[in-house]
Image (cartoon, helix red, strand yellow):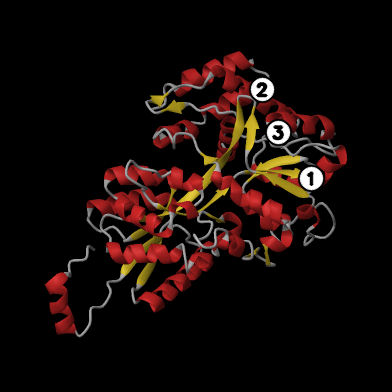
Amino acid sequence: MKQVASGSLALIVALSCGAVSAQDIRFWTTETQPERVARQEAMAKDFTDESGIKVQVIPVEETDLGTRATAAYAAGDLPDVIYHTLQYALPWTEAGILDPEAATEVIDALGPDTFAPGPLSMVKTEDGYASVPVDGWTQMILYRKDLFDEKGLEPPTSYANVEAAIKALHNPPDMYGFVAATKVDENFMSQVLEQVLLANGATPVNADGYSGFDEKKLTEALEFYKTLAKASPPGELYWQQSREIYFAGKAAMIIWSPFILDELAGLRDSNPPTINDDPTSRELAEKTGIVTVFSGPSNPDGAAWADARYFGITADADTDAAMDFVKYAVDEGYMATLGTAPEGKFPARRGTADDPTKFVDAWSKLDVGVDRKAPLAEIYPQEMIDEIVGGLDDGQRWGVQEGQLALASKIVNSQVINRVVREYIDDQIDVATAVAEINDELAKVQ
C-alpha cells in the first residue's frame, strides 16, 4: 500500500475530492486474547482521533505469524505494521519483508538513547535497525530475601552466591535450595539452561556459524546446574512445579518469567500463593527479591536472558502513516500499548530526552492482576522495579550479536542440551562426557 499521491497529483486529488483523506493501515498483532485486542483497538482509535489515520487491528496467532507473513509478502499484501518477536526481525529484513529504513527513521526521531540497549542492539543492522523495540522481559531468579537476610547471604547474582545460599538454606522437605528445570521435553528447561550458560559466557555459535561450546565454560555451567538439580525435589520439574513449590514457601530460589509477579502478590485466584491460609496475601511478594543479571566464574560481567517484541514496518506499508502509528504507539500511546499485560511487558523505551524515566515510572503505576488489580509500584519496592526493567539493558540471547539467531534457535529446539544435561545430573555420564556429547551432537544440527 505505497503512497502514490505527491506533488501535483496530490493537488489534483485534493481539488477533486475536497481533501486528501489518510489511507487506512493494517496492524497485525500476536496479542490475540479478546481483552488485549480491545485495548489495542482503543489505543488505535485514540491514534485515529489524533491523526485521522484509521487502523485496522488484526489478531494473528503467534504460531501462524511466520507462514502468514511469508504468504502475504509473496502476494504483495503485507500489512503496514507487524508486532513480532525477536526471531523474525533480521530474517524478515534480509527477505525484504521489513523496511529497516523506516524503522531506523522512527528510532532516530524518538532518540536511540531513549530505548533500552538490549532490545535495540538485538535488531542492529549495518545501517540502522530492523524494527522498533516495543517491550520485553527478562527471566528472573526469584529468591526468599527474608531468608537470605536472616543468614547474612548475598543476593544470588553469581554462581558462587547461589551455591552459598543452597548450602545455607537447603533443608528438604521443608525447604529446597532451588527448583531446577529437569523435564527434557519442556521449552522451560531450554530457556533456563540458556540463561545459566549465558551467565558464564558459554555460547555454541560465532559469526561464522556453529563453533561448539568452550569446554571450560560449559564444564563450569554444567557442574553448577547439577548443584541446582541436586538441591531440587525429585522428579521431572518445569515451570508448574517451581511455581507451586515456591508459592508453598518450600523453595529458597526459582527461575521464572515476570508473568509470575501478579500471582505472587495474590492477584490471581487460579494460581494463588499458598504460603499461608490467605490466597490474596502479599506476604510472599514482600519476602521475595529478584535478580535478572547473574554471572559465572568465566564471565564476571554476567548476562540476562531476554525476550523482546517489536513493531516492524513492512515493505508494502503506507510508510508515512505506518511510521506515525508506530511513533504514537511508543510515545503518547505507550502506556496503552504496555497496558495490555504490564507484568510481562517491560518498557523497551525508558523515557524521552527531556524525561529519561518517564515511561518506566508510568509503567510501574499500571495495574496488574486478574481477579484483583494493583500497580507493581504498590507491591514491590523501587529497587526491585529498577532491577526488573534494568535487565533489558544487558538482555542477551544466543546468536543475536553473532547474526546466527536462526541457527541458535535450531540448537535450542533440538533439545540436545536438555537431554545430555539430564543424563549428567542423573549421574549416567560424567561432565567430560557430557561436554563432548553436547558439542558433537550439536555439530549435526543444520
**First in residue order: circle 3 vs circle 2:** 2
Q: Quadrant of the C terminus?
A: top left
Q: Residue furthest bottom?
A: 18
**First in residue order: circle 3 vs circle 1:** 1
Residue type marked 1: Lys
Label 3 with label 2: CB-CB less than 8 Å = no
Which secondary structure, mark 1?
helix
Height in image: 178 above or below 368?
A: above
Residue drawn at (84%, 55%), measured in percent from left and top?
Answer: 276
Task: Calculate the distance from the C-alpha at mark 3 to the C-alpha at mark 1.
Answer: 26 Å
Whole-percent x, y for residue 137 in the image = 56, 49
User: What residue is shown with label 2?
Assistant: 223
Residue drawn at (30%, 52%), measured in percent from left and top?
Answer: 101
Residue type marked 3: Gly
User: What residue is shown with label 3?
Assistant: 235
Label 2 with label 1: CB-CB less than 8 Å = no
Question: How would you rate the neighbour count of disc 2 (Cα within 10 Å): few for under 14, some for 14-19, many for 20 or more?
Answer: some
Whole-percent x, y for residue 385 in the image = 66, 54
